[in-house]
């Protein structure tokens, strides 16, 4: 690869030609990029403009997990994920719990936050007096930006000065809390914070009683949103669990409970356990055009909030009632951003019945809990490889261009056998001769 300047100024075709020169061994694949362009040039232009230096689209499967009963309502949940078995596991868990009362969600809180990080080299009390004197005026300066959000019932809900000097010399924050209604609110929050930061510096310069320089380092929302919290749970009497893959209901409940306890105390297990939860969560976050990096970063920090990384889900067995719960922060939106720009995100929200952001928090958490239930169910009974290998076999067969008949006989042949690429290829070759 060579260094290039002005790459962003090249047309899409020129970018592709440049890539062709740089990676001549991949000419066929690079030529193939255009086959992934949308047939409607207006739609393609929309995709191109989401991000910079776009030369094509990267496809991921868009699947549906039906039969979710959530707060007495039936949902079909759209999921975007490349990993096999995830949508199947979510659908299986949804159906299992549909006949056992369904999922219940509880939106605990919807507060988001952001900070103006600044350095003040002076007396803390003096800064506090300055802040209290200027607090209303600081808020007043954000009025124009807040006007539409205020109309929708949102806006700034709190503004506080935090002294962080015990952790970093002369470091303070304006800590701002927000309600952003159905929007994820990143742009709104960042605009408000930048306005506050500018006003803070300006007021400090003009204030003769504030002794010491005040310098704003940065203004940015926090993706850590422990006060934007949702809880989802399923529960039923143990006996209603029925026999599960050879285990009696009480044996299953006990093993399941143990698995969750292990993920609560052991980091090596907790990370994988939470990854399974995020198989469900990310798939819906992506399908609905939300920011999966933000939700993941936040939830993993939340999982480590007491200093150790732990399972985000919990299990209890009290008075013979099996209860499985997931509590996590989810800052997402159903208006703004990609949610209304990406045609598939728009469709996902239509499939979900145009939910509010709070309702979507519940739906996403529900997919996470369903996924986690499915994974633990397999792990404590058959193991996960059985299900995975079925899909793996299909992927290999498709890669090898197997016919319908070959696929069916391979499924029977490999039912109890170890599946590998070479074994499947040998099987197909034997079939041909
Ligand atoms: C695989 O993507 C996810 C699991 O490993 C989750 C888990 O172990 O709980 C099956």
Image (tube, grey):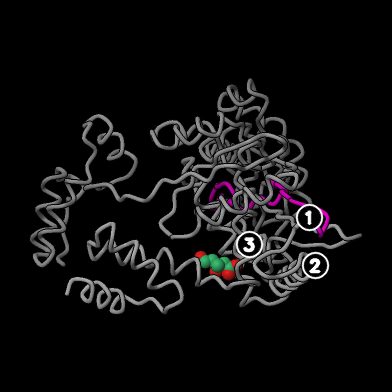
Q: Is residue 81 left or right of residue 364?
A: left
Q: Nearer the viewer, residue 256 or 242?
A: 242
Upstream in sequence: badge 3 or badge 2: 2
Name the residue tied to disc 3.
301
From this viewpoint, which residue is outermost toward the top?
151
Q: N-terminal of the two: label 1 or label 2?
A: 1
Q: What residue does disc 2 label?
A: 250
Q: Residues within 10 Å of mark 1 (few under 14, many from 20)?
A: some
Residue 43, how many percent across, how many down?
28, 32
Quadrant housing residue 238: bottom right
Q: Secondary structure at mark 1?
A: helix
**Location of residue 57 in the rendering, given as x and y in whole percent from the top left corner:** 27, 47
Q: Which residues are magenta?
A: 216-239
**Mark 3 packing: few (<14 Cα in 10 Å), some, or many (20+)?**
some
Image x and y of residue 331, in percent = 60, 45
Of the numbered discs 1 and 3, the one sitting upstream in the chain is 1
Marks 3 and 2 sit apart, C-alpha to C-alpha, by: 34 Å
Mark 3 secondary-structure assignment? helix
């Amino acid at each position: 690869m060579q260094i290039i300047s002005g790459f962003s100024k090249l047309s899409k075709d020129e970018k592709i030609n440049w890539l062709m020169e740089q990676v001549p061994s991949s000419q066929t694949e690079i030529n193939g990029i255009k086959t992934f362009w949308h047939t409607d040039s207006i739609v393609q232009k929309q995709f191109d403009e989401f991000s910079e230096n776009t030369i094509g689209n990267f496809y991921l499967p868009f699947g549906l997990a039906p039969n979710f009963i959530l707060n007495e309502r039936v949902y079909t949940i759209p999921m975007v994920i490349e990993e096999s078995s995830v949508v199947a596991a979510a659908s299986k868990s949804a159906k299992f719990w549909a006949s056992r009362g369904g999922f219940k969600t509880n939106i605990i809180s919807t507060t988001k936050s952001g900070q103006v990080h600044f350095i003040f080299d002076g007396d803390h009390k003096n800064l506090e007096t300055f802040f209290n004197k200027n607090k209303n005026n600081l808020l007043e300066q954000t009025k124009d930006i807040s006007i539409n959000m205020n109309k929708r019932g949102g806006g700034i809900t709190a503004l506080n000065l935090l002294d962080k000097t015990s952790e970093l010399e002369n470091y303070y924050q304006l800590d701002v809390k927000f309600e952003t209604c159905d929007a994820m609110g990143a742009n709104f929050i960042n605009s408000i914070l930048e306005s506050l930061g500018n006003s803070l510096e300006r007021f400090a310069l003009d204030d003769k009683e504030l002794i010491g320089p005040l310098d704003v380092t940065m203004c940015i929302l926090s993706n850590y949103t422990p006060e934007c919290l949702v809880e989802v749970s399923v529960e039923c009497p143990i006996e209603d669990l029925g026999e599960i893959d050879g285990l009696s209901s009480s044996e299953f409940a006990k093993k399941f409970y143990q698995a969750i306890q292990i993920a609560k105390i052991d980091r090596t297990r907790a990370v994988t356990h939470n990854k399974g939860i995020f198989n469900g969560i990310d798939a819906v976050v992506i399908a609905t055009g939300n920011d999966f990096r933000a939700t993941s970063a936040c939830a993993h920090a939340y999982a480590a909030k007491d200093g150790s990384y732990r399972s985000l889900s919990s299990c209890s067995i009290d008075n013979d009632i099996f209860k499985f719960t997931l509590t996590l922060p989810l800052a997402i939106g159903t208006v703004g951003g990609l949610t209304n720009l990406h045609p598939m995100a728009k469709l996902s929200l239509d499939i979900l019945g145009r939910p509010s952001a709070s309702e979507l928090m519940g739906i996403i958490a529900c997919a996470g809990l369903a996924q986690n239930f499915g994974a633990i169910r397999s792990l404590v009974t058959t193991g996960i490889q059985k299900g995975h290998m079925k899909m793996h076999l299909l992927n290999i067969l498709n890669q090898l261009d197997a016919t319908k008949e070959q696929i069916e006989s391979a499924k029977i042949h490999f039912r109890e056998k170890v599946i590998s690429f070479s074994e499947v290829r040998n099987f197909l070759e034997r079939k041909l001769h």
